[in-house]
Amino acid sequence: QVQLVESGGGLVQAGGSLRLSCAASGRTFRLSAVGWFRQAPGKEREFVAAISWSGATIYYADSVKGRFTITRDNAKNQGYLQMNSLKPEDTAVYYCAARTPFTAATTRQYDYDYWGQGTQVTVSS
């Protein structure tokens, strides 16, 4: 079992930056792909970024490519999402998710087995 807790959300002006963290419990996190997803009010949850367990494979949604960076520190059982040049349309609840160990990183939320509670990111114009 993996438990995930996001932190680092908040209110920021357009053009600003935030760094989200995903703290994981359990010994299998380092072997699990990690994804970040977000859900804006009135919209469906959407893919943001994903990273394989080794860090060798990374995916980004087109809407965040070049602005967001996903990383992980397996020694610390942590995942991160660095968000730069934030826009009002980035406002959403951001979720960290992890897959069953030894499975590939994907962009599909239904492939992810473990989810955090989410952290709110609000970008003002």
Image (tube, rainbow, N blue to C red):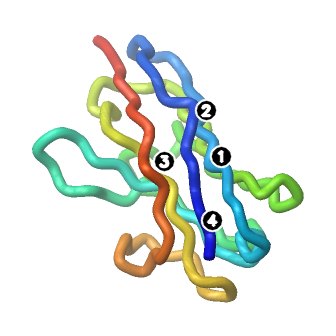
Name the residue type under label 4: Ile
Secondary structure state at the residue bearing disc 2: strand
Q: Which label's residue is closer to the chain start, 3 or 1? A: 3
Q: Which label's residue is closer to the chain start, 2 or 1? A: 2
Name the residue type under label 3: Lys
Seen in the image, is 64 located left or right of residue 105?
A: left
Question: Which residue does the numbered mark 2 point to in the structure image?
Answer: 19
Q: Nearer the viewer, mark 4 or mark 3?
A: 4
Residue 48 location in percent, x, y?
43, 54
**CA gap, disc 3 and disc 1:** 15 Å
Secondary structure state at the residue bearing disc 4: strand
**Residue found 71% across the figure and 70% down from its top:** 29
Name the residue type under label 2: Arg
- Location of the N terminus by quadrant is bottom right
Q: Nearer the viewer, mark 3 or mark 1?
A: 1
Q: Which label's residue is closer to the chain start, 4 or 3? A: 4
Question: Which residue does the numbered mark 1 point to in the structure image?
Answer: 80
**Circles 3 and 2: CB distance less than 8 Å?**
no
**Circles 2 and 4: CB distance less than 8 Å?**
no
Question: Which residue does the numbered mark 3 point to in the structure image?
Answer: 65
Name the residue type under label 1: Tyr
The residue sitting at the right extreme is 75
Is the residue 46 above or below the residue 80 in the image?
A: below
Give me the disc on residue 51.
Answer: 4
**Residue found 55% across the figure and 77% down from its top:** 99
Depth check, front residue: 88 or 27? 27
**Residue found 42% across the figure and 80% down from its top:** 111
**CA gap, disc 3 and disc 2:** 16 Å
Depth check, front residue: 29 or 1? 1
